Amino acid sequence: MLEQLNSLDTNALLALNRLFPEAADTFWLATTKTVTWLPLYAVLIHRLYISSTFVVFTKRLALVVIGILLFDQGAEFFKYTFERPRPCHEVEGLRVLAHCSPFGFFSAHAANGFGLAFLVRKWLHSSWFPVLLVAAAIQSFSRIHLGVHYPSDLVAGAAWGILISFVLNKVETTWN
């Protein structure tokens, strides 16, 4: 059963890795970088600031910082606990466009993107949530295009981010 799932994961990776032509590489290289998303994050922080009192804003900003630490460091913990090699080290015929560190389960990009979207969804106007989901999906997919994550790495990362966001949202409700 595990071999079948691994085979399915690898086949999906190869198909998705080749989905876009080489002309799109620059776009995917840019979307994987955090700096590309800084304007969006700055707007989110501004929206959080103008839509709440200073005390509420400060608490929420603290939750965002804690969330990012948990999303990101959770991914690092699991990478070195499971030690699943990244596909760039073991899949023949894969286009690899980025530095390939040893382990990849699970994606911190997916955890951060989806975690942030689910964390702030109740704090902002409902029109922001789809925007943040699309941003998270694009940023996550970039990891497949670059050849450094399996699709299951993205799914697990997204699940981790959503789980941590759920917990942090519960923490916030106890503050009110």
Image: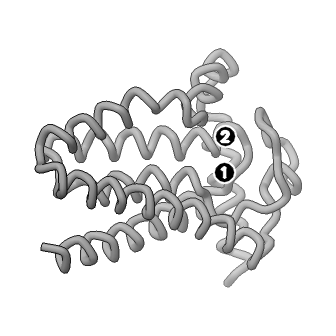
Write down the quadrant of residue 55 in the picture: bottom left
Q: Residues within 10 Å of mark 2 (few under 14, many from 20)?
A: many
Q: Position of residue 134 (x, y in %)?
A: 36, 40
Q: CA distance from mark 2 to mark 1?
A: 6 Å
**What type is the residue that disc 2 sits on?**
Asn
Count neighbours of disc 1 (C-alpha within 10 A) and say few if under 14, some if 14 to 19, many if 20 or more: many
Q: Amino acid at mark 1?
A: Leu
Place residue 7 in its image quadrant. Answer: bottom right
Q: Classify 172 as above or below 51.
A: below
Q: Which residue is mark 1?
A: 13
Question: From where the camera sits, is residue 155 visible?
Answer: no
> Where residue 136 sits: x, y (%)?
43, 45
Residue 163 locus on image (x, y percent): 39, 73
- Residue drawn 84% across and 42% down? 93
The residue singled out by tag 2 in the image is 17
Which numbered disc covers residue 21?
Answer: none
The C terminus lies in quadrant: bottom left
- 44 relative to 159 in the view: left or right: left
**Dot 2 and dot 1 residues touching (CB under 8 Å):** yes
